[in-house]
Amino acid sequence: MRKGVADFLRQLGARVTGMIWRLGFASRFFLLMLKHSGMSFRRFHLTVREIYFAGVLSLIIILVSGLFVGMVLGLQGYDTLVRYGSSEALGVLVALSLVRELGPVVAGLLFASRAGSAITAEIGLMKATEQLDAMEMMAVDPIARVIAPRFWAGVISMPLLAALFSAMGVFGGYLVGVRMIGVDEGSFWSQMQAAVDFEEDVLNGIIKSLVFGVAITWIAVFEGYDAPPTAEGVSRATTRTVVSSSLAVLALDFILTALMFRGN
Amino acid sequence: MMARKTLDLWVGVLVVIGFGALLFLAMKVANLSAFTGGASYQIKAKFDNIGGLKVRAPVKSAGVVVGRVSEIHFDNQTFEAVVTMSIGSSYQFPKDTSAKILTSGLLGEQFIGLAAGGDSVNAKDGDTLKITQSAVVLENLISQFLYSKAAEGNDKK
């Protein structure tokens, strides 16, 4: 019995130390990646290639989900607002919820599962097939050549994708609210324009998506780099990327929202 | 040396429509174009009570937005709220214009309504409006109503 308790404590301690160890390693990895970022901008075509894989290929899922989320917001928002006789405020509801929250967060979650997992799997597989080691043998720094371009591509793509998601969502809300249900078009747009502030709402949303982009791609490249070089290790690392970057997006969203919109 | 690839085209497309979406959010959703910059002049007004008026609230005359509230502060000498409005230069008002704090709808936001007076001289930059009417405070309104009801009841006896 006593032995069981001691074992349990020992395992718990090992887990916690292991987690802190990994966190420290991830931070050092982050700094190293920033230090070796020069090549991603000097040979920008490396980054452009990764923007294609992370950003352009995520375009369809972002656009389609943005449209549907906006359409659902239009339907649900109308249903509630019409009870208070203020269905003209539909534009405000759709635009504010998209620009402030749903745009960055949902685009971030989609980006994590669409592009983050792909980055982890790719880097993990490169490590498992010893391509990274081979690069080092040829005096090519794998962090500068493979990791940093993927990181910067994610950071650049994320705000663009979030803006596209929000714009598509507003369009979806317009389609359902104005075209389908018949909310007055003029007041839909004018109330939206009166209520949405560029700095307060749009710019803060972009800052959010930029932070999410950094967090997601950092987690993705780190998990790939740190993956055990086996088939099982890579698959586990891919799962971990999706889980921890989704959690990171939601937790960071709470912190950023608390900092940005303190209700004054 | 570097060949242009179709891949570059697609990345270009992403960047163009991404910035297009940003522009759409800035112009069509947030309306960045209205009342930023543009020549304007400042007019002040003192109120006993501004209710829930906020900076950037619209200033309307005859229902048309002619400017925005640019600053609100408290006057330590007169114990009144001093509201500074920036009015677009294309809108001119007589010196004896009156300012009211109004509410759009029952629960809407508060704004300043300007009603033009009859003076032949127009208000200049930095002028203070003399005639003002404070925001209606719902609690005061209810208590007045209750008092008058109570007084009615006494009269009947």
Image (cartoon, rainbow, N blue to C red):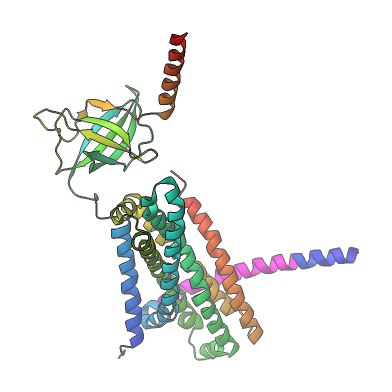
Indicate yes or no whether the magenta region holds residue B9: no
What residue lies at 45% left-to-right and 63% top-to-bottom? A72
Closer to the camera in the image, A58 or A48: A58
In the picture provided, is B125 more to the left or to the right than A69?
A: left
Q: Position of residue A262 (x, y in %)?
A: 47, 47
Q: Is residue A233 above or below residue A163?
A: below
Indicate yes or no whether the magenta region holds residue A38: yes
Q: Position of residue A204 (x, y in %)?
A: 41, 57
What residue lies at 54% left-to-right and 91% top-to-bottom? A134
In the rendered structure, which segment of residues is drawn in magenta? A13-39
- Determine which quarter of the picture holds residue B147: top left
- Determine the main secondary structure of the stretch shown in magenta: helix
What residue lies at 31% left-to-right and 41% top-to-bottom? B57
- Determine which quarter of the picture holds residue B134: top left
What residue lies at 23% left-to-right and 25% top-to-bottom? B131
- Which quadrant does the C terminus of chain A fall into? top left
Closer to the camera in the image, A33 or A7: A7
Extreme residue in the right direction: A1
Q: Position of residue A74 (x, y in %)?
A: 42, 59
The reply to whether residue A37 is in sight is no
